[in-house]
């Protein structure tokens, strides 16, 4: 084994050993650790920011964009927000140990399902260093050990944050291997990590589509992923247009660069002539560039004709596709073809169409008369999220504490045997 | 693309298209189809059995063992049991459409989780042809399309059963691609199937450890698997031995060849001198061969000294490991090292030790004072099972109808936007 391989295997083994001890940690103990971590981050702010400065200087030298340097910076605001995150997660309910559906079987066995940690989670993410703390926090509260692999640009920041979190673990008598950051930036470390199926139970990648595809294709460990968010709103013939316009504006413009931003609008043909000009005007005022189908360009000549490659694109900016559809079935077919199973919305006042949309559309969140921006763990009531899954196994949609656990069967018997 | 590749891709595409229509099928419609299938199997019994005869003749020529031929045969009994299976699944509740945890958020959004089918399931199994019907039945009831790949020895039987099921689908106006059997026996077909991640949502392999490892390592689609069942019973110092002996006998001998049979017994040292001779005698009367640690051989010289390779073996016959342990922590360490996360049991009357065992042992089913043989979908109340998962993602333990579904978020709004 190479030195790097030794390092990764040792980290994975250590994480598994630590995970074994986390299972029986009480919620109070876990919450105490989280609060202690918040205080430690505050106390070691100067150390953290001076390590962060090394990454920022190196990033400037490498010519990182201002946007990337901004994401990299551990400003006082970001540090406060990490501390608040720790305190908020400490205040959340602990899913571990919950027993669901306990029933008495005909033979007297009491059978239920107990929620338990997953074990060891591997997290692979790009340059934002606050993810190090956010992810470690959620994993720890759910009783999991975590191995973190952040972007190479943030290596000093991530190592500094990890050392603070590990010290907090040790000071509370908990195995510090419960939270580990991979200390090298070689890409090979990721490949080695993805091969530790004996020790790691789940991989969560967060970043660009390229990273996520690489992880999904390389990993021998289960992966919870979302490739992209191509979210649509279908404005039905029975839409309340006074609701439609604010929802469309909010979905597209409140934060265009995130996965739950709107990328495509489908408008029912019976309202297109009347509504498209108003919609186009409202969007123009917000700086949105509409890319439309032939029919929509015929109604509003200002609209740029869409190219084939525009349909289904995740723009992450102010471009927006618009298409006139004959009916809801055409909308369904479009969503099936171009959607990414992330967020799909209908604007309608028609009861039956709302119910059919909710029941039949396949996406992690399907909504009526609301903004796409609500597909978010906090907004949907999970308290906090570690990511959004657009694959259906284990979790579909935002993943909070509960999604970082699983259930085992528990059985209380009185001597029963099977006949 | 090769002809075979074309075939597999077309099947996968067809399954995905069919799955789209199954989502909106009512429970009544699905149950009618299942009952119709049961009647069709009855009506076409002669055709099914004559096709099965081809497999049996070929199997005899190939020199299959009597046990394998027995598993291959679609006797009247097996056919009745398939028909009963169809009727039982028709009688089970339908998980699809269930909405859980619907809550009103502070902004008035109603947020819940709706249970939906997974989509397309690929099932890879060995020679028992009745699995074709059992698996198709459960998948259909949960609203999934299924692609079946059975053992080559059963190809005529599986094709005959599939044709009967497909006819029943068509006669009820449902896309017959919802149930498909891969019509060729080339191993390459499996590899091709495991690459259809665009169309297939889940792979369930059932068979020997070699098959399952091959599938897990080759598949780019999520796999729900269990490698083996190495189940243990820990007989605590506070055990009621009048319960222990019948449970141990039942766990080991009621059906030794299955995954929930007992493979190892751990006995607390404080009761070993007294209990081991009685236990050994009871086991001897049932024909069980004990393989023991040094200490147990010291107490009962009849016990065969275990070899290193015996610990953690899945014998699937009447061999049984026995080890004297100092305390529950040693039992935990043994289970961690040699268990397969399948079924782990404590025999005790001590409340605290029972609760600690339930909370801390990591296995798909953890039980107190009951036989290992209860880790089974039917026995635990799932109605029917498609397999037992010993990995933690999505499902851990027996998988019934609910485990063949997932949940999406649904949101009813009144025009809300995010601020």
Image (cartoon, coloured by chain):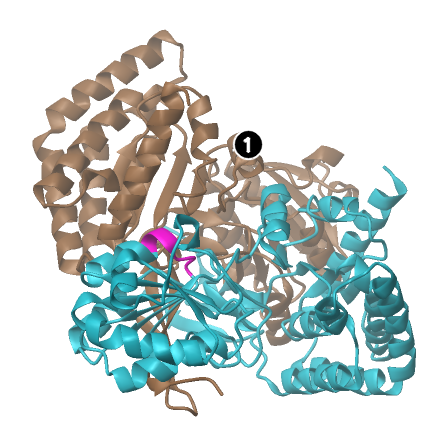
Chain colours: A cyan, B brown
Q: Nearer the viewer, residue B25 or A377?
A: A377
Q: Is residue B101 visible?
A: no
Which residue is situated farthest in the top direction here?
A: B61
For residue B165, which quarter of the picture? top left
- Tell me the quadrant of the picture where the N terminus of chain A can be found: top right
Instruction: Tell me, yes or no, whether the highlighted magenta stretch contains residue B301.
Output: no
Q: Is residue B285 visible?
A: yes
Which residue is situated farthest in the front direction here?
A: A301
Residue at x-position 26% and y-position 21%? B156
Residue at x-position 66% and y-position 69%? A139
For residue A141, which quarter of the picture? bottom right
**Element under label 1?**
helix
Above/below status of B101 relative to A228? below
Above/below status of B145 relative to B143? above
Q: Which residues are magenta?
A: A336-341
Q: Nearer the viewer, residue A131 or B405?
A: A131
Above/below status of B112 relative to A123? below
**Horizontal placement of A328 versus A77: left or right?**
left
Residue at x-position 16% and y-position 33%? B164
**Horizontal placement of B260 versus B273: left or right?**
left
Q: Where does the image place residue B180, in percent across and percent down from the top left?
A: 27, 34
**Horizontal placement of B350 versus A156: left or right?**
left
Q: Nearer the viewer, residue A43 or A102?
A: A43
What chain does badge 1 belong to? Answer: B
How crowded pointer 1 is (Cα within 10 Å; few <14, some 14-19, many 20+) is rated as few
Q: Where does the image place residue A361, in percent across and percent down from the top left?
A: 30, 62
What residue sits right under mark 1 in the picture? B214
Instruction: Tell me, yes or no, whether the highlighted magenta stretch contains residue A340.
Output: yes
Picture mark count: 1
Q: Where does the image place residue B334, in percent across and percent down from the top left?
A: 71, 52
């Amino acid at each position: 084994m190479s030195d790097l391989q030794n390092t990764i295997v040792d980290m994975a083994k250590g994480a598994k050993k630590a995970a074994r001890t986390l299972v029986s940690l009480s919620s109070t103990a876990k919450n105490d650790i989280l609060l202690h971590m918040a205080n430690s981050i505050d106390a070691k702010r100067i150390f953290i920011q001076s390590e962060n400065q090394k990454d920022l200087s190196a990033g400037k030298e490498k010519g990182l964009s201002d946007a990337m340097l901004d994401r990299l910076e551990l400003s006082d605001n970001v540090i406060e927000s990490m501390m608040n995150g720790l305190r908020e997660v400490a205040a959340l309910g602990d899913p571990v140990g919950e027993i669901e559906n306990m029933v008495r079987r005909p033979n007297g066995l009491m059978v239920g399902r107990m929620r338990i940690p997953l074990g060891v989670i591997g997290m692979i993410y790009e340059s934002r260093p606050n993810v190090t703390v956010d992810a470690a926090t959620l994993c720890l509260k759910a009783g999991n050990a975590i191995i973190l692999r952040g972007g190479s640009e943030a290596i000093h920041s991530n190592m500094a944050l990890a050392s603070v979190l590990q010290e907090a673990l040790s000071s509370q008598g908990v195995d510090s291997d419960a939270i580990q950051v991979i200390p090298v930036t070689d890409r090979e470390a990721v490949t080695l990590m993805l091969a530790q199926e004996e020790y790691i139970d789940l991989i969560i990648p967060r970043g660009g589509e390229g990273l996520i595809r690489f992880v999904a294709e390389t990993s021998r460990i289960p992966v919870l992923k979302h490739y992209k968010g191509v979210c649509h709103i279908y404005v039905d013939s029975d839409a309340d247009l006074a609701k439609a316009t604010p929802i469309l504006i909010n979905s597209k413009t409140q934060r265009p660069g995130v996965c739950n931003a709107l990328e495509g609008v489908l408008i029912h043909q019976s309202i297109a002539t009347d509504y498209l000009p108003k919609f186009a005007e409202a969007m123009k005022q917000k700086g949105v560039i509409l890319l439309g189908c032939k029919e929509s360009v015929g109604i509003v000549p200002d609209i740029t004709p869409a190219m084939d490659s525009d349909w289904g694109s995740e723009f992450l900016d102010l471009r927006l596709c618009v298409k006139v559809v004959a009916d809801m079935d055409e909308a369904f077919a479009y969503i099936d073809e171009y959607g990414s199973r992330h967020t799909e919305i209908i604007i309608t006042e028609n009861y039956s169409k709302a119910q059919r949309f909710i029941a039949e559309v396949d996406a992690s969140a399907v909504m009526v008369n609301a903004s796409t921006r609500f597909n978010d763990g906090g907004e949907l009531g999970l308290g906090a999220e570690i990511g959004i899954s657009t694959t259906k196994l284990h979790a579909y949609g935002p993943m909070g504490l509960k999604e970082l656990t699983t259930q085992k069967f528990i059985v209380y018997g009185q001597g029963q045997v099977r006949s």
